[in-house]
Amino acid sequence: MTQNITQPKPWFVYLLRTAQGSLYTGISTDPERRLREHEGSARGARSLRGKGPLELVWRCAAADRSSASALEARIKRLSRARKLELIKHGTLL
């Protein structure tokens, strides 16, 4: 008998860029879906309404929701310049 064990969905931390160049940090199990929600759904963040088009500029997988939240908090504390470096180089320096 084969057991159907589902793997937990990975969590991601992501950065979006607004049309005005602002950066937004969030977490999700599906950053592309979350981008669509931010762009045209009531489920999107209020702070992003009317600031599109939005662009997903960076994402990083995390082990679980707790790790993703901790990384999100760390990124939110970075300066804009450091966030731009993160986007350019792909990793926290």
Image (cartoon, rainbow, N blue to C red):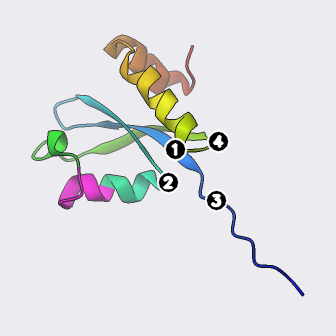
Residue annotated with mark 3? 8
Question: Circle 2: is it few (<14), some (14-19), or many (20+) Cα within 10 Å?
Answer: some
Q: Decide which of tag 1 and tag 4 comes sooner along the chain.
A: 1
Marks 4,2: beta carbons within 8 A: no
Residue 64 at what x, y percent from top left? 60, 44
Circle nearer the viewer, 3 or 2:
3
Q: Amino acid at mark 1?
A: Phe
- Closer to the camera: disc 3 or disc 1? 3
CA–CA distance between discs 1 and 2?
6 Å
Instruction: Say which residue label 2 marks.
Output: 29
Q: Relative to residue 40, is residue 12 drawn left or right?
A: right
Contact check, label 3 and label 1, Cβ < 8 Å:
no
Q: Amino acid at mark 3?
A: Pro
| Residue at the image point whose x is 46% and y is 21% from the top | 74
Q: Which residues are magenta?
A: 36-44
Q: The disc labelled 4 sits on which kind of residue? A: Ala
From the top left corner, tell me how far across and down residue 34 is, in percent.
36, 54
